[in-house]
């Protein structure tokens, strides 16, 4: 079958090649014929650090062509979205049944493909704020796929949401998604916030600490800003007992299939919008990676297999 391979020696950085081995599923894994996959910023770092011939890809959507042998999970013919650790950018992939969810009618496959990393991370980082009704949430890096989901989910939880984005063209979109205000710098966000979701890192984290309310929470999610943050105990004067914590999607304990099913239900009901800022056939993967690295994708990048 054809699959994407890491190719650090190639100017395009990745290559779609024939001859990849067919997936050999465990008893609890189904084989999915992949119709679409989405890209995540974390995969840029993985491609830069993994060896040649490593196979990337985490978010996939497609059709079950072989159900799990142990009888669990979706049946053959089901449209599904799934989450794997690697090797998802291929014509076929084995996915554990408890990491799959059926796509309901009315939800497009390319929209479902956005949910694995970005949607699930947004869901579980917003949950870290607890009950949000009447509380204030700051989303840093709000124009990307993750940030757009965070804005929507926090707003649905009843929070007042302020979005931070340097992309002038995203202001109207973020307002439509539920942001009460959009600012270009974290420092310009008015007041203090019970929950600060930092999808950028570096200097943004320093600014985030200055915007968290006493006993509030700052969640570190992204690291696109390469200059490390410098934070000291004295920076928390006026923000006493605030928590500074990390979130790594691979360590999340919530059931993957449950999270994906919940998010798919929101898509079906029109309560969640999957904004896709780059789409095309998977042969355009190098261009999609460049656009993502350069911050030119408003929302998610999703590629399709013909």
Image (tube, helix red, strand yellow):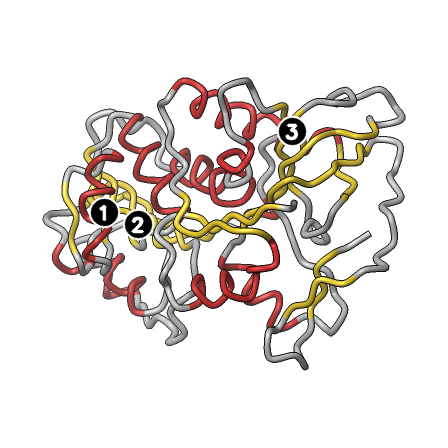
**In the rendered image, the vertical position of residue 145 relative to residue 26, given as above or below:** below
* Relative horizontal placement of residue 11, taking residue 7 as reference (left or right): left
Within 10 Å of disc 2 (Cα), the crowding (few <14, some 14-19, many 20+) is many
Report the mark closest to the observer, 2 or 3: 3
Q: Secondary structure at mark 3?
A: strand
Name which of mark 3 and mark 1 comes first in the sequence. Answer: 3
Q: Position of residue 271 (x, y in %)?
A: 35, 23
| Residue of label 2 | 142
Q: CA distance from mark 1 to mark 2?
A: 6 Å
Residue shown at 70% from the left, 30% from the top: 63
Q: Which of the two discs, 1 and 2, labels the residue nearer the N terminus?
A: 2
Q: Which mark is residue 163?
A: 1
Tell me, for residue 209, which label it has, or none.
none
In this view, the residue farthest toward the front is: 306
Picture residue at 71% right of the left edge, 29% below the top: 98
State whether residue 159 is above or below residue 84: above
Q: Are marks 3 and 1 in contact (CB under 8 Å)?
A: no
Determine the residue positioned at 66% across, 77% down.
Answer: 8
The residue labelled by disc 3 is: 80
**Disc 3 to disc 1, C-alpha distance:** 31 Å
Q: Secondary structure at mark 1?
A: strand
Whether the residues at callouts 1 and 2 have beta carbons within 8 Å, the answer is yes
Q: Position of residue 175 (x, y in %)?
A: 19, 39
Disc on the earlier residue, 2 or 3: 3
Residue at 62 percent of width and 37 percent of height: 61
Circle 3 packing at 10 Å, graded few (<14), some (14-19), many (20+), is many
Camera-nearest residue between 252 and 233: 252
Residue 97 x/y as whole percent:
74, 29
């Amino acid at each position: 079958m054809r699959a994407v391979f890491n190719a650090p020696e190639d100017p395009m950085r990745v290559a779609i090649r024939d001859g990849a081995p067919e997936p050999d599923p465990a008893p609890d894994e189904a084989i999915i014929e992949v119709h679409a996959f989405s890209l995540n910023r974390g995969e840029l770092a993985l491609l830069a650090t993994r060896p040649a011939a490593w196979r990337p890809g985490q978010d996939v959507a497609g059709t079950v062509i072989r159900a799990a042998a142990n009888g669990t999970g979706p049946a053959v013919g089901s449209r599904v979205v799934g989450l794997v650790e690697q090797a998802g950018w291929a014509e076929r992939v084995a996915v554990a049944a408890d990491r799959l969810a059926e796509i309901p009618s009315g939800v497009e496959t390319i929209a479902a493909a956005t949910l694995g990393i970005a949607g699930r991370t947004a869901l579980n980082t917003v949950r870290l704020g607890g009950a949000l009704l009447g509380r204030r949430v700051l989303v840093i890096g709000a124009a990307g796929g993750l940030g757009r989901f965070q804005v929507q989910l926090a707003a649905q939880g009843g929070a007042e949401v302020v979005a931070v984005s340097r992309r002038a063209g995203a202001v109207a979109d973020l307002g439509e998604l539920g942001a009460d205000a959009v600012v270009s710098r974290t420092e310009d966000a008015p007041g203090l916030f019970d929950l600060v979701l930092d999808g950028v890192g570096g200097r943004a984290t320093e600014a985030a600490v200055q915007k968290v309310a006493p006993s509030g929470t700052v969640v570190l999610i992204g690291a696109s800003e390469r200059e490390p943050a410098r934070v000291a105990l004295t920076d928390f004067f006026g923000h006493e007992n605030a928590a500074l914590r990390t979130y790594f999607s691979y360590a999340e304990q919530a059931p993957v299939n449950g999270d994906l099913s919940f998010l798919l239900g929101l898509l079906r009901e029109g309560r969640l919008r999957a904004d896709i800022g780059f789409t095309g056939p998977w042969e355009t993967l190098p261009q999609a990676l460049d656009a993502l690295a350069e911050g030119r994708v408003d929302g998610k990048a999703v590629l399709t297999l013909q």
